Image: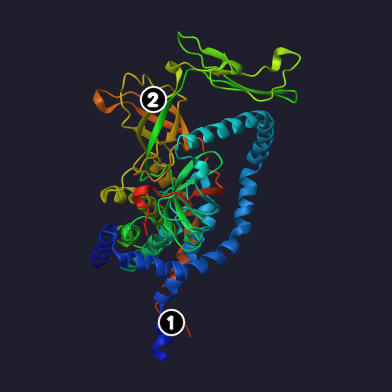
């Protein structure tokens, strides 16, 4: 019983539950609200925010988990988003290698940059596995809007990721 | 590295159509759908507020335009209905398939694609209503897409603009100008006059009463010659000629294209504005003669490739609400008991 409670209280359980809520927001309200015709990829933004806050390893695992969940509601092949999200989160997690003591705004820039790269990487990955047709100039517009939206949402997503993936719950 | 390998294995399994990945999706759907439904209810006021703020002026303008358009089209609709009925009767007499003979299900759009790189929507009818994968989806204007995933009470529709979408279509080369006019009068019969304007030939006009083999019923001849019933029959040279090609989606920002059009001399040059309809056939997932759009641009290509046609769709895919799913399956897909 205590072991079950420990699993329920673990950070990975929190991650799964939060990812379900974020996914439900993604498929409902964010599918409707499209600033400049671009959908805000909340799942990707969260994975990248986790990478920027917790580093590459935790970011990659989070990217993988939320990516598989995202793939489950799409018609694209299972594993495609997880690969892209994990790659973007790893990229954001490399920030400490370039900035000695990352500040909140350097993390924010990292989230915005790698969210845009991750979103633009998606059609490239689709093209690699044979689902061509999405590589056109509009992906730069999409990347730019996603970067702006990532910059706006990062102040919320970074504390959220910090709370979700902290080591243990304080008693 | 391990995570990357896991993703690649999942991709490989899914692309090969593994049942394991389908099971994962189904199980996840069972867990996720209740959460999504609750979130949809909670966030609906937010979505409505957003639409109210961002689209109010557009809706107001559209409303005025639509009122004007309805007034203009009320008269034309009578003529169109008569023509459609006549066409269906002719097709039925000749044993040809018509859309009127295909059952359909009406569904409402309940969600857009949650991705920037998928052109799909979700509807609130599924296998319980008889919907199957591949069935064509229409709105009031024309073809919208086809069903790609089916659940018990919902389905996912791939839009015609998705790069994965492909359909065999016909390009109808019409005479240069065709007008239809209806003059309705209580004391006179309905008159439908179709006047093609050919390049050099003149259309032959034959009064109904003089068509061999045709005996008119009781006809009230009006006092003035305005309402005299006439039928204008175009000469064979001005009849519509059809050529088939493949329509393919190009993403949301670019119009769909039609290629593999033959450069047949008989077909002649394709003009902007030529209608595009589905071609049907035993292998096609859509029945014949569903309206898709009109040619908006002709891109000539060298050699035997034939021209590339850009299509302006008649259905407004950015504003879909109620859709009709034709319960149509080609002969090759039907399961015989």
Q: Residue at 52% of width from left, 68% of height from top?
A: B35
Position of residue B177 measured from the top left corner of the image (x, y, whole percent):
51, 18
| Quarter holding residue B211 | top right
Seen as rendered, the residue at the extreme bottom is A1
Compared across the picture, whether B92 is left or right of B44 comes to: left
Q: Are marks 2 and 1 on the same chain?
A: no
Secondary structure of the residue carrying tag 1 is helix
Q: Quadrant of the N terminus of chain A?
A: bottom left
Q: Is residue B261 above or below residue B322?
A: above
Q: Secondary structure at mark 2?
A: strand
Q: Which colour style is shown?
A: rainbow
Tell me whether the residue at label 2 lies in contact with that at label 1, contact meaning CB atoms closer than 8 angstroms: no
Residue B253, picture quadrant: top left
Any part of residue B220 in sight: yes
**Mark drawn on residue B333:** none
Please give the residue where the numbered disc 1 appears in the rendered image: A8
Q: Which residue is mark 2?
A: B298
Q: Nearer the viewer, mark 2 or mark 1?
A: 2
CA distance separating discs 2 and 1? 61 Å
Q: Nearer the viewer, residue A164 or B78?
A: B78
Q: Indicate whether A46 appears above or below A12.
A: above
Task: Chain letter for mark 1, please.
Answer: A
In percent of width and height, residue B249 lies at 39, 40
Q: Residues within 10 Å of mark 1 (few under 14, many from 20)?
A: few
Q: Position of residue B99 (x, y in %)?
A: 50, 41
Point out residue A14 in the picture as x, y percentages from the top left corner.
44, 74
Task: Name the image quarter holding residue B245.
Answer: top left
Q: Nearer the viewer, residue B46 or A105?
A: B46
Q: Looking at this rendering, what residue extends furthest in the top direction? A: B200
- Is residue A36 shown left or right of residue A47? right
Of A9 and B225, the residue lying toward us: B225
């Amino acid at each position: 019983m205590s072991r079950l409670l420990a699993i329920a209280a673990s950070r990975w359980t929190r991650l799964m539950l939060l990812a379900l809520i974020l996914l439900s927001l993604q498929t409902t309200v964010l599918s409707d609200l499209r600033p400049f015709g671009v959908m805000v990829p909340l799942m990707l933004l969260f994975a990248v925010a986790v990478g920027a806050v917790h580093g590459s390893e935790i970011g990659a695992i989070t990217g993988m988990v939320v990516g598989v969940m995202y793939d489950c509601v799409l018609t694209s092949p299972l594993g495609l988003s997880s690969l892209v999200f994990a790659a973007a989160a790893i990229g954001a997690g490399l920030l400490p290698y370039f900035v000695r003591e990352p500040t909140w705004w350097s993390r924010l820039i990292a989230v915005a940059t790698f969210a845009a790269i991750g979103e633009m990487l998606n059609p490239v990955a689709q093209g690699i596995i044979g689902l061509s047709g999405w590589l056109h100039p509009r992906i730069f517009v999409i990347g730019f809007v996603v970067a702006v939206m990532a910059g706006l949402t990062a102040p919320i997503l970074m504390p959220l990721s910090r709370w979700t993936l902290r080591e243990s719950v304080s008693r | 590295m391990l995570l990357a390998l896991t993703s690649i294995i999942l991709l490989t399994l899914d692309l090969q159509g593994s049942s394991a990945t389908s099971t994962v999706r189904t199980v996840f759907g069972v867990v996720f759908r209740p959460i999504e439904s609750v979130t949809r209810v909670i966030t609906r006021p937010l979505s409505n507020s957003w639409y109210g703020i961002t689209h109010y002026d557009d809706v107001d303008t559209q409303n005025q335009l639509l009122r004007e358009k309805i007034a203009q089209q009320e008269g034309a609709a009578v003529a169109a209905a008569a023509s459609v009925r006549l066409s269906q009767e002719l097709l039925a007499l000749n044993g040809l398939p018509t859309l009127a003979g295909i059952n359909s299900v009406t569904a409402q759009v309940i969600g857009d694609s949650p991705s920037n790189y998928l052109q799909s929507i979700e509807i609130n009818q599924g296998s319980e209503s008889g919907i199957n994968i591949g069935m064509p989806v229409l709105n009031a204007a024309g073809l919208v897409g086809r069903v790609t995933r089916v659940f018990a009470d919902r389905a996912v529709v791939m839009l015609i603009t998705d790069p994965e979408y492909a359909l065999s279509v016909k390009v109808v080369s019409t005479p240069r100008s065709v007008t239809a006019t209806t003059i309705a009068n209580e004391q006179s019969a309905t008159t439908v006059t179709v006047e093609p304007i050919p390049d050099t030939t003149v259309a032959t006009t034959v009064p109904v009463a003089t068509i061999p083999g045709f005996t008119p019923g009781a006809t009230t001849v009006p006092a003035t010659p305005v309402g005299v019933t006439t039928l204008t029959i175009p000469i064979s040279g001005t009849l519509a000629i059809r050529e088939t090609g493949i329509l393919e989606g190009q993403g949301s920002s670019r119009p769909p294209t039609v290629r593999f059009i033959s450069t047949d001399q008989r077909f002649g040059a394709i003009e902007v504005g030529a209608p595009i309809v589905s071609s049907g056939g035993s292998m096609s997932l859509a029945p014949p003669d569903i309206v898709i759009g009109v040619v908006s641009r002709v891109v000539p290509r060298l050699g035997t490739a034939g021209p590339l046609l850009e299509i302006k769709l008649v259905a407004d895919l950015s504003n879909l609400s109620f859709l009709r799913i034709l319960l149509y399956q080609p002969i090759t897909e039907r399961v015989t008991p």
